[in-house]
Image (cartoon, rainbow, N blue to C red):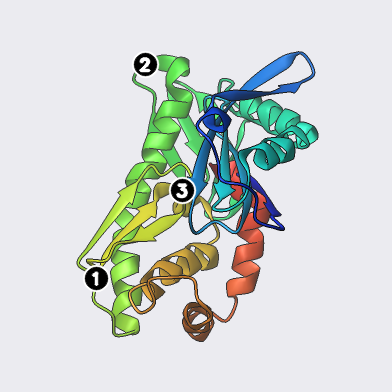
Amino acid sequence: MQLVLPWMSPKPRVTGAERAPASVEVGPHSYPVTITRHRRARRFVLRMTPEGVLRLTVPRGASIAGGLAFAKGQGRWIAREAARRAERAGPWATGTMIWFRGAEVPLAVSDARVSFADASVALPDGVASVRQASEAHLRRTAAAELPPRCLDLARQHGLTVSRVSVRNQRSRWGSCSSRGAIALNWRLIQMPPEVSDYVILHELMHLKQPNHSRQFWREVAAVSASWRESEAWLKRYGRELL
């Protein structure tokens, strides 16, 4: 999850003092901020880690002070995101809604098992392991289904992939290395199949264009007619999965 804001004009060079640890006050709460500068960034980017730390990315040429001013102006978003994360961190039980194959489905817990959709998963450690057992099942399902799907789509488009892995990425849906290795977030199994396919195709097109240039997006559009709709789905619901 992130907030972005285009930055306007170059600012003075950053000094060591400007890189000092910072924090943002929202009501009675204080959120630490870690600051990084990215030479390819074109805007300020604000994210919140699972631990509740704000991560501020500052473009090259923009000031740290400007980035902190941006972060401090996002109090409402920070409060909402913190509340959402606190809710997600709570215990899973009967009635908890989770995403699976593009739909929100309820959990049902009984007789040391948790069930959702067509899955029934044992709870070896009792009710306390509902979330752990549910996510472990989702990850196993992703590991079984996503690599073959990636290889199938690669063959359809005449591409060669050196390796496909499924990972627990916290800030991206997938990646493509310069050696042709594709890494996919296990949470793709929670998306609609067409959105999951779009993410895979997006990474596969990086085999042709290792960037996000106009030519890259033309390659994406050529293989995924509904890529804009998939991007919209990710923008609307993606933060609920990460």
| Whether residue 35 is situated above or below residue 213 in the rendered picture | above
Mark 1 residue element: loop
Residue 104 or residue 34, whichever sits in front? 34
Residue 114 or residue 101, whichever sits in front? 101
Mark 3 surroundings: few (<14), some (14-19) or many (≥20) residues within 10 A: many
Taking the view exactly as shown, the residue that stands out farthest to the top is 28
Residue for badge 1: 161
**Mark number, residue 135:** none
The disc, 3 or 1, on the residue closer to the chain's N-terminal end is 1
Q: Are marks 3 and 1 in contact (CB under 8 Å)?
A: no
Q: Amino acid at mark 3?
A: Arg
Q: Residue at x 68, y 18 (%)?
A: 30
Can residue 199 be seen? Answer: yes
Mark 3 residue element: helix
Q: Is residue 115 left or right of residue 44?
A: left
Can residue 93 be seen? Answer: no
Mark 2 residue element: loop
Q: Residue at x 62, y 29 (%)?
A: 85
Residue 14 in percent (x, y) is at 55, 41
Residue for badge 3: 187
Q: Residue at x 37, y 55 (%)?
A: 184
| Whether residue 235 is situated above or below residue 223 in the rendered picture | above
Instruction: Please count the marks in the image.
Output: 3
Residue for badge 2: 125
Q: Amino acid at mark 2?
A: Asp
Q: Residue at x 50, y 40 (%)?
A: 36
Q: CA distance from mark 3 to mark 1?
A: 21 Å
Residue 175 in percent (x, y) is at 37, 58
Mark 2 surroundings: few (<14), some (14-19) or many (≥20) residues within 10 A: few
Q: Is residue 220 left or right of residue 240?
A: left
